[in-house]
Amino acid sequence: MVLQGANGILFTVLPPARSSLLGEASAETHDISDGLLAEARRVAQREGVTLRSLIEEGLRSVLVRRSEREDYVLPDASVGGQGLQPSARGASWEELRALSYGDRL
């Protein structure tokens, strides 16, 4: 993986060798803002860890948080009744909209 800022390539992180369909190792390039990358470097240096390990820790944290998040379920807002009135059954969307909004369109 190559991480680069606006001023060009800053460093390269190579993934463990693994074969692709062509039998070659893969690599990816990602743009990261210069400010974020500089801050990450400072934190990594202050904590005595590699930038790679800091990035991996951050990605793991985000993936765990997102996997624990429950999907939003739209509340049921159904109303009683028997559906469309007989005069509206078979009407096109444009006709239903005109019936619903009248002069407000």
Image (tube, rainbow, N blue to C red):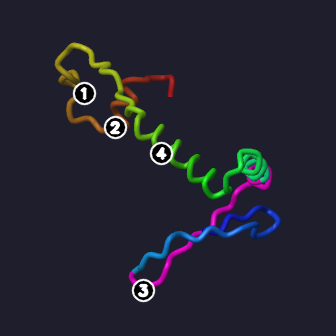
Q: Is residue 27 left or right of residue 23?
A: right
Marks 2 and 3, how far apart at CA:
52 Å
Which residue occupies 48% across, 23% down? 103
Determine if the magenta segment contains residue 79.
Answer: no
Q: Look at mark 3 in the image and give the residue it sits on.
A: 22
Q: Look at mark 4 in the image and give the residue it sits on.
A: 63
N-term mark: 4 or 3: 3
Nearer the camera: disc 1 or disc 3: 3
Which residue occupies 63% across, 58% down? 52
Q: Position of residue 87 (x, y in %)?
A: 22, 25
Marks 2 and 4, how far apart at CA:
42 Å
N-term mark: 4 or 1: 4
Which residue occupies 55% across, 49% down? 59
Q: SS of the residue at dot 1?
A: loop
Determine if the magenta segment contains residue 23.
Answer: yes
Q: Are discs 2 and 3 less than 8 Å apart at CB?
A: no
Residue projecting furthest to the bottom: 22
Q: Nearer the viewer, residue 104 or 22?
A: 22
**Amino acid beneath label 3:** Leu
Q: Which mark is residue 88?
A: 1
Nearer the camera: disc 2 or disc 3: 3
N-term mark: 2 or 1: 1
**Amino acid beneath label 2:** Trp
Q: Look at mark 2 in the image and give the residue it sits on.
A: 93
Q: Which residues are magenta?
A: 21-37
Q: What crowding class fits label 3: few (fewer than 14 Cα within 10 Å), some (14-19), or many (20 or more)?
A: few
Q: SS of the residue at dot 4?
A: helix
The answer to whether residue 13 is above or below residue 100 is: below
**Amino acid beneath label 1:** Ala
Name which quarter of the figure residue 33 lies in.
Answer: bottom right
Q: Position of residue 93 (x, y in %)?
A: 34, 37
